[in-house]
Image (tube, rainbow, N blue to C red):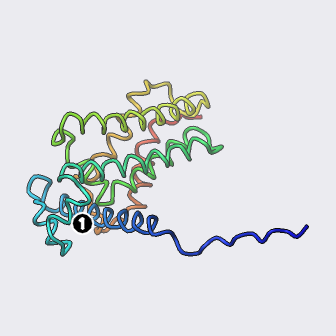
Amino acid sequence: MKNKKRATASPWPSQARRRKHDFDVKRVAIMDTAARLFHERGYKETSLNELATALNVTKPTIYYYFANKEEILRAIKNHCHDEFVRNVVEIRASDRRGIDMIAEAMRRYAKILTSDYGRVVVLIHDRVLTSKGRSAVQDRTTEIDSHLYAIYDKALSDGDIRPVERHVIHYTLFGALNWSPYWYNPHGKIPPDKLAEMQISLLLDGLRVRD
């Protein structure tokens, strides 16, 4: 019996897939420009008309991708939260010691904070969102915190850090990092990677167990 010839998968994506790809690319373009404008001008001061002008499109075009300005802001915040969740999940799955996991989580979070998206997350307070929007953002924040608290537990069980309450560890380390967008200039003398290492050293040295 002759073998049936296996059909070759088409190298061209389906029309529906192409449309989905184009839609996602344009949503990201809107988010990128909005993040820059929100950071430069402020969220309340940036209108959808200004965003449309910066993108060289009409205002109704933006409405095709986002219902309103708040939805754009939520999408930016969600993008950062989801990115950091992926990072901490990857870190937790590694065979690092707990304190090295903390350092790596701080390193990756510090990198996010130097981006336009990261600065928007910190500098534009969740209070500008509706109660439903704030609740959705808080759910993602709670998810991040649960992963980080598990990393602190690992570091404590490894005996590498002093027995400090986890919420004190959390708000001291990441609270300090959260201030970076208020004063740090990513185009200044200190590059983002060097800043992250300096912050990690300063903050973690006081937490380490001394021999």
Instruction: Determine crowd level at label 1: few under 14, some 14-19, many 20+ residues with C-alpha closer than 10 A.
Output: some
Position of 25 with respect to 62 (left or right) is right
For this orientation, the residue located farthest to the front is 1
Residue tagged 1:
33
- Residue 86 screen position, x and y as percent: 49, 48
Quadrant in the rendering for residue 100: top right
* Residue at point 60%, 34% (across, down): 211
- Residue 149 screen position, x and y as percent: 47, 31
For this orientation, the residue located farthest to the right is 1
Position of 155 with respect to 195 (left or right) is right
- Residue 53 screen position, x and y as percent: 13, 72
Quadrant in the rendering for residue 50: bottom left
Q: Nearer the viewer, residue 77 or 11?
A: 11
Q: Nearer the viewer, residue 194 or 29?
A: 29
- Residue 128 screen position, x and y as percent: 15, 42
Number of numbered tags placed on the structure image: 1
* Residue at point 50%, 24% (across, down): 163
Q: Amino acid at mark 1?
A: Thr
Q: Secondary structure at mark 1?
A: helix
* Residue at point 61%, 40% (across, down): 97
For the N terminus, the quadrant is: bottom right
